[in-house]
Amino acid sequence: METKRFNELVFLKLLLSIDGIGPQKIFNLLAKFHSFENVFLADKKSLNEVEGISSTLSAKIVNAKSNYSDLRNSFEKELEKLSSLNGNIITYFDNEFPSLLKNIYFPPIFLYTIGNIKLLNENCIAVVGTREPSAYGKMVAEKFASELVKNGLTVVSGLARGIDSIAHSSTINANGNTIAVIGTGLDIVYPPENKKLFERIKEHGLIISEYELGTKPDAQNFPRRNRIISGISLGTLVVETKIVGGALYTAAYALDQGREVFAIPGPINNKQSDGTNSLIQKGEAKLVVKVEDILNELKLSFDVEKEKTKPKVELTLFEEKIFSVIDNNPKQIDEIAELTNLPTSECLVHLLTMEFKGLVKQLPGKMFIVA
């Protein structure tokens, strides 16, 4: 790793180590000081001028500089171990960081990765459910995961026992791509019986975690990691879950993030289906019985590529420029802005007009496709 990159990461880690500093405050600090090192070179008066930085926080930032050497040494050791695992580390500010994940509330600032990092920006669907699935749940999870793969989607799950494990293994068996979001450090496999599956995902997909190496499987880690499972996905499919199942956390996060939630209906006398049936009953999830239900809801079609026809309505020069980069594969607003070399805010205005004209359709996460 280059020295400049290493130093940036150390200062970012130092900032995150301060109690009371989260993503939004980091963004505000960066907007004013333009680098993380400059934050620690600033005095209290300058720090207090930043929105959200109180006198107490500014004092903590100034005092945190004394921890720099220790943190630098520990981070250096962590990177050495990460390298031995063939792992990588990316931040919110890197190009590789998934654009969908940037748009959630409280996004992770660091992501530790092992495997094919390009999958982070592929079209993903989360498949989650109970750790104690019924025979019906197992069958459905395997069927949907393998069929999602055949339609070009990457399957995301949490490497937990039950539905998660079935989703990962079925995807790999169907020669597809899968992403496991775990609640431990990358050097700890949990549950331990998933070690072989962990290795298979490393070879055929991607494993990610926001937690430092050595982080143990503490109970509070798993509900928190669920926001990442839904956050990198266009939608979340809940196969089976009890009324208080962990998969409901993922569904709740997806709803908060403006993403689609899908649920498989199940027998009313089966506790494993209480959660999914409840989601459907409350109108929080779309009832699905086949993969096409998901593809149609998200306006995704990978089996047959549609030819983009020239619009019959009159377009402005800017609308023509934007329309030329939009196709049947969803594109995020930041990508559209980059491809057209137009400001994001300007793209959104024109896209709204184009949506009224029936030319484009907006998907969750500010993704756009041809209507």
Image (cartoon, rainbow, N blue to C red):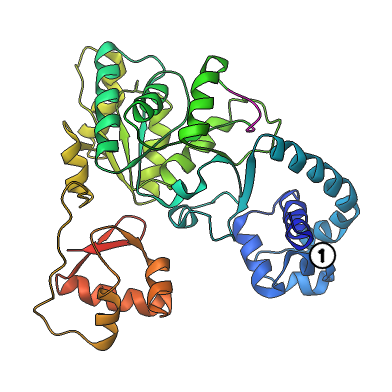
In this rendering, position of residue 45 left or right of residue 95: right
Q: Residues within 10 Å of mark 1 (few under 14, many from 20)?
A: many
Tell me residue 365's x, y (percent).
36, 56
Say above or below: 232 vs 250.
Answer: below
Dominant secondary structure of the magenta stretch? Answer: loop
Residue 76 on the magenta span: no
Q: Residue furthest left?
A: 312
Tell me residue 109's x, y (percent).
61, 52
What residue do we see at 37% from left, 80% from top? 346
Residue 186 on the magenta span: yes
Q: Quadrant of the N terminus?
A: bottom right
For the residue labelled by badge 1, is the local secondary structure a helix, a strand or a loop?
helix
Tell me residue 218's x, y (percent).
62, 26
Q: What's drawn in magenta, residue-wise?
A: 185-189
Q: Residue furthest bottom?
A: 317
In this rendering, position of residue 333 left or right of residue 151: right
What residue do we see at 38% from left, 14% from top? 132
In this rendering, position of residue 90 left or right of residue 242: right
Is 229 in front, or is 276?
Answer: 229
Is 156 in front, or is 304?
Answer: 304
Three-letter amino acid code at disc 1?
A: Phe
Is 181 in front, or is 81?
Answer: 81
How many numbered circles does the render carry?
1
Say above or below: 239 vs 87.
Answer: above
Give the residue pinned by disc 1: 40
Tell me residue 232's x, y (percent).
43, 47
